[in-house]
Image (cartoon, rainbow, N blue to C red):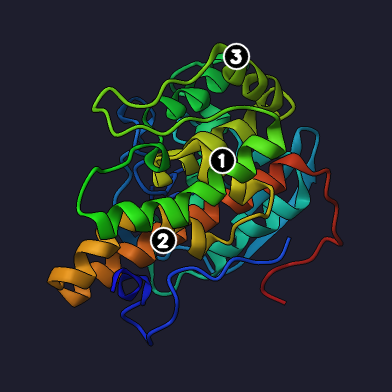
Amino acid sequence: MWRSCLRLRDGGRRLLNRPAGGPCASMSPGPTIPSPARAYAPPTERKRFYQNVSITQGEGGFEINLDQRKLKTPQAKLFTVPSEALAIAVATEWDSQQDTIKYYTMHLTTLCNTSLDNPTQRNKDQLIRAAVKFLDTDTICYRVEEPETLVELQRNEWDPIIEWAEKRYGVEINSSTSIMGPSISAKTREVLVSHLASYNTWALQGIEFVAAQLKSLVLTLGLIDLHLTVEQAVLLSRLEEEYQIQKWGNIEWAHDYELQELRARTAAGTLFIHLCSESTTVKHKLLNE
């Protein structure tokens, strides 16, 4: 029965359970962001060179201190973020590193570097257009014609998300089995452009990052609106792959590693969006206390 593909390998849980409603501090870490033009290429690992991590408030925002050194971006700009909550989250990434600094695990730091350096020199309108463009190749809008079990799985799991987005934003989002992809109306694009315009450029960098991980703007919007959890959004984006794994099996460790990495990147990107979208102030503290 097709429902068997909704079983996770780690414990037999349902696939979805929807909810109700350099040697110096100037070296910048982080994973390679999918877009080649935006990619930074720091060393993947290095020995930890600092003892304490703290944050301070400066004229331009909140700064990260590694001992007495100010963290800087790859372009040697002072690493300054707009909210204290985001600064604490980034500082936590640095403080959680053990004897070895694993740059590829520091997704929030990388997103901040991208926002600060803006290596592709894109303005807000260009970031919005880049995000909306994911609609043309949105994962949940591409459907198969066979086998029937997968057709039904896609319909049962993806259609409710599309229906939610249509109702939430007052738009029409079509799906298609054609290699040319779905037809997205100009009105739908205009509405989503207008909605995304309410976000600042930092949050838009995060939205594009998450959409690139999930290969879906619709799933990204569901995450931002708290309609989906990170686990649900990731599994929805991998629906066909999970179906094939249930049918043919997989290399266990490779599948698990890939899944956890995708969840980590998606979760970090979603947190980044929210922390950049809210004016959040918390009590200052040293992380080593």
Say which of 3 and 100 sits in front.
Answer: 3
Kindly state the secondary structure of the residue where label 2 is placed: helix
Q: Residue at image x 35%, y 72%?
A: 3
Q: Quadrant of residue 192?
A: top right
Q: Position of residue 12 (x, y in %)?
A: 38, 85
Q: Which labelled disc corresponds to residue 235? A: 2
Image quadrant where one finds the N terminus:
bottom left
Q: Amino acid at mark 2?
A: Leu
- Give the labeled residue for mark 1: 112
* Up/down of 254 relative to 167, above or below: below
Q: Residue at image x 52%, y 18%?
A: 129
Say which of 231 and 107 sits in front.
Answer: 231
Q: Position of residue 246 (x, y in %)?
A: 23, 72
Q: Is residue 178 left or right of residue 69?
A: left
Q: Residue at image x 49%, y 16%?
A: 121
- Give the labeled residue for mark 3: 125
Mark with earlier residue (2, 1): 1
Q: Estimate the spatial distance between the alpha carbons at disc 2 and disc 1, rounded to whole Å.
A: 26 Å
